[in-house]
Image (cartoon, grey):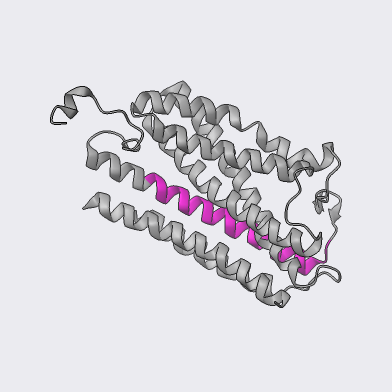
Amino acid sequence: MKRVRILMAIAAAAMVAGLYLTLTSPTDRLQGEFTRIVNIHAPSMWVAFLAFGVTALASILWLVRKTDRWDRIAEASVETGVLFTATGLFTGMVWGQAVWGRAWDWADPRMASTAVMFFVYIGYLALRRATPDPVMRARRSAILGAIAVVQVPLVYFSVNLFRSLHQTQSIRPDGATMPDEMVIALLVNFLAFTLLYVALTAGRVEVAKAEESRSGETVPAGDAVATPLLSEVEDV
Amino acid sequence: MSDQVIVFGTFFICYAAFVWYAARLHLRYRRAKG
């Protein structure tokens, strides 16, 4: 846990640096103050993609090696990824309302595909809670985690493949379409959010380990959905 | 509402969500460790 605390302190310092650069960087002439929201929105979505990619990798490794470690990493990464997808969607909606004049449009392929991805990974967490047997839970979620990752490139390239309100990539191999100060602020935030993802996921893995060692087995599924055995309800 | 208030409010909600999740992990860990 000491390692997680160090990671969390580094991530917090990077987040403060990112926030400072965000608040002091120049704004776009048309978007005004709302330019700053992009410095949370884009890194949030990057971390969500990273988290679901890590989940897919850990899921495949669980299917190959069947060790608890990979199951814990897959679960932790989805939980963190869902949190960052939520902040990505929320900031995108606030920015969209201010700049495009509407917070949501199902006709936009990136918004629609991101929403589907968000609900699929919430479904992943629900599937885990609904499966009491630890081995069955790990297998089912590993299969879903390995398949669901196909949505990540679909969301990312949706702006290139379909007509979209979203712009195409702003930082490209041939240069950026923004001033240097804005690019630096954005890149520092990408780094800070990545460090925060690593710290939160490592923390979640430690929580899972602690809860497993306490219960003597693996993390129990939600009591509300697990069907009790008849032998356990004899007093009813 | 001014643009700055909306932007700062958005930042506050997002950072609060990160802090809430980290605090929740900390509490769960302490509870599990007894």
Q: Is residue A222 visible?
A: yes
Number of marks present in the image shown: 0
Residue under the point 29% across and 43% down: A211
A83 vs A39: above or below: above
- The quadrant of the picture occupied by the C terminus of chain A is top left
| Residue A186 within the magenta-colored segment of the rendering | yes
Q: Is residue A74 visible?
A: no
Q: Residue A215: x, y in percent?
A: 23, 39
Magenta segment main secondary structure: helix
Q: Which residues are magenta?
A: A178-205
Q: Nearer the viewer, residue A147 or A11?
A: A147
Residue under the point 32% across and 42% down: A209
Q: Residue A226: x, y in percent?
A: 33, 31
Q: Residue furthest front?
A: A236
| Residue A74 within the magenta-colored segment of the rendering | no
B22 vs A225: above or below: below
